[in-house]
Amino acid sequence: LNNVLHRPNGTLDGSSTGIIRISGTAEDATAGALITHLSNNKNSLLTPNIVSVSRNADEKLDPRVCKDGAAYTTALAEIPMGDNFYTQVDFKGAFSANWEELWIKDWTTLARNKHLPSAPINCAVATTDELISDHVVFYPNPASDYFIIENNNEEEISVEVMDLLGRVIIETMTLPSFAKSDILVNHMQSGVYFISVTTKMGAKSTKKLIVE
């Protein structure tokens, strides 16, 4: 429920690039039931955009998530009705973007051994406007039957389309470097949507798409 899974070039399946491992004697040879369960409960395979990662005792491990990352920008599943164990928040995972809510500081071994910073580290500022305008383009916009997206980056990108409420309308697809793809929108109602683009390094951009 409400997890962001991350593996570079990974897919939400049991293939060679998948994050699921399936035994040869498994009842469900494709893990279809598990994949459906993960998808229906708002689990996504995207870059979480963690503030800072380090395995050394150098005060550079800041496990909070940036507000432009998938922990904040993907749709949330509803808390089960009548369940008082969970608390409704606006992010996925164990850590919010708020430094004051970093509950592992000051008392854990990570803090004692100086893995954690003594002050918050700022989220990296991605040049998102340059990313979408110079290296990733999509057309036509407005679109009716389909639009074309071109990835002119030297790294692959992940693309998804969301509505104004943040609901994913077109599931995440991966586009290799210097490639393009047609994306059908003829099943979507007329209106305004968002195309979310994330690079392998975590730079992210969101731009409006109008469907006629």
Image (spheres, helix red, strand yellow):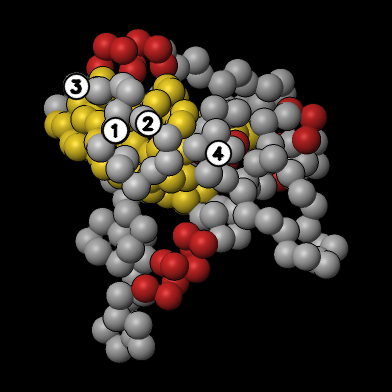
Q: Secondary structure at mark 4?
A: loop
Residue identifier under label 4: 166
Dividing the image into 4 quarters, which one contains the N terminus?
bottom right
Q: Give percent across and percent down for residue 157.
A: 29, 33
Which mark sits nearer the N-terminus, 4 or 1? 1
Residue identifier under label 2: 211
**At 33% from the left edge and 63% from the top edge, which residue is drawn?**
13
Q: Secondary structure at mark 3?
A: loop
The answer to whether marks 3 and 1 mark residues whose Cβ atoms lie closer than 8 Å is no
Q: What amino acid is found at the position of numbered circle 2 in the picture?
A: Val
Which mark sits nearer the N-terminus, 4 or 2? 4
Residue identifier under label 3: 152
Question: Separation of disc 4 and disc 1 at Cα?
Answer: 21 Å
Q: Secondary structure at mark 2?
A: strand
**At 78% from the left edge and 35% from the top edge, which residue is drawn?**
101
Q: What amino acid is found at the position of numbered circle 4 in the picture?
A: Gly
Which mark sits nearer the N-terminus, 3 or 2? 3
Q: Give percent across and percent down for residue 4.
A: 52, 48
Mark 3: give few (<14), some (14-19) or many (20+) Cα within 10 Å.
some
**Is 209 or 92 nearer to us in this picture?**
209
Does 109 appear above or below 21? above
Which mark sits nearer the N-terminus, 3 or 4? 3
